[in-house]
Amino acid sequence: MDGVDDVDNMDDVKDTDDADDLSDTPVIYVQSSVSGAAKILVVGPMGVGKTTLIGTVSEIKPLSTEATMTQAGARLDTAVRPSKVTTTVALDFGRITLGGELVLYLFGTPGQQRFLPAWKDLARGALGALALVDTRDLEASFDAIGHLEDLDVPFSVAVNAFPDSVLHSEDDLRSALDLLPHTPLVICDAREHKSSVQALISLVSHLIETATEAS
């Protein structure tokens, strides 16, 4: 599997302690111990926390192409919340190293529906995707998940735990999102480093297991 073929076990990156070991000090250069790299998409509807998650985990200064929301933009995207004042108009970009061996290049996709056609270009070369979900508006995530399926991009789902999130059982969430049994589903808080890293580790584990089964 391109990008992670040199990382054949997850012992060094599965451990939850890895999230604590990652330094908060910005890293400019890729570590010499790195043996693999992967392009990962972070997708979801507007306001679900993509920019926040990438900014939380990135070891370099994240690139964010946000613009102030206009009334016209809000009318085009009916899922806009009153507190949402900016939106990603191109992409978010960050980088994180897992276990000192695997670099993930994170690309956050625009959440507005009119940018969905641009996903084909952003998805080119992507090994997988982390789909963020907001339980306060599950239907808003349908387009993002459906688009990943159409593009044949492997993915896992992370429910971003907002303070006023509606609680659902895992079975109910899987049913509502029409997820296959093998699709990972985790809870995370995009504002918390360890929680967000664990969501990415869950995705990488899934990608490696899928590739191993296919080989």
Image (spheres, helix red, strand yellow):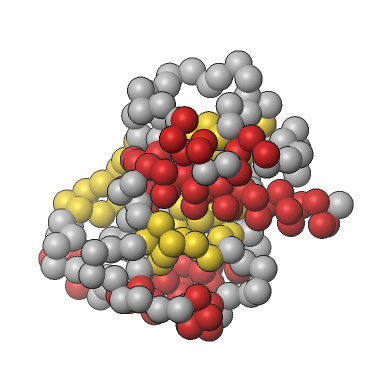
Q: Nearer the viewer, residue 171 or 48?
A: 171
Q: Which of the 4 image quarters holds residue 6?
A: top right
Query: With respect to residue 26, does 84 lie above or below?
Result: below
Q: Name the residue nearer the viewer: 214 or 71.
A: 214
Examine the rendering and report whether any part of residue 115 can be seen.
Answer: no
Image-quadrant location for residue 26:
top left
Furthest residue toward right = 215
Please state the horizontal and vertical placement of residue 188, each as a whole percent of the image. 41, 57
For residue 191, say whether it is visible: yes
Determine whether, in the image, residue 17 is placed left or right of residue 49: right
Residue 208 or residue 19, whichever sits in front: 19
* Residue appearing at x 31%, y 76% in the figure: 166
Where residue 101 appears, x then y in whole percent? Answer: 63, 29
On the picture, is 101 further left or further right than 7?
Answer: left
Query: Percent from the top left, x then y, of residue 143?
Result: 46, 72
What's the residue at 60%, 38% (across, down)?
A: 13
Residue 28 higher or lower than 167, as above or below? above
- At 51% from the left and 56% from the top, the residue drawn is 130
**Is 107 situated above or below 164?**
above
Q: In which quarter of the image is the N terminus?
A: top right
**62 horizontally vs 181: left or right:** left
Q: Which residue is drawn at 72% across and 36% down?
A: 7
Left of 67 or right of it: where is 206?
A: right
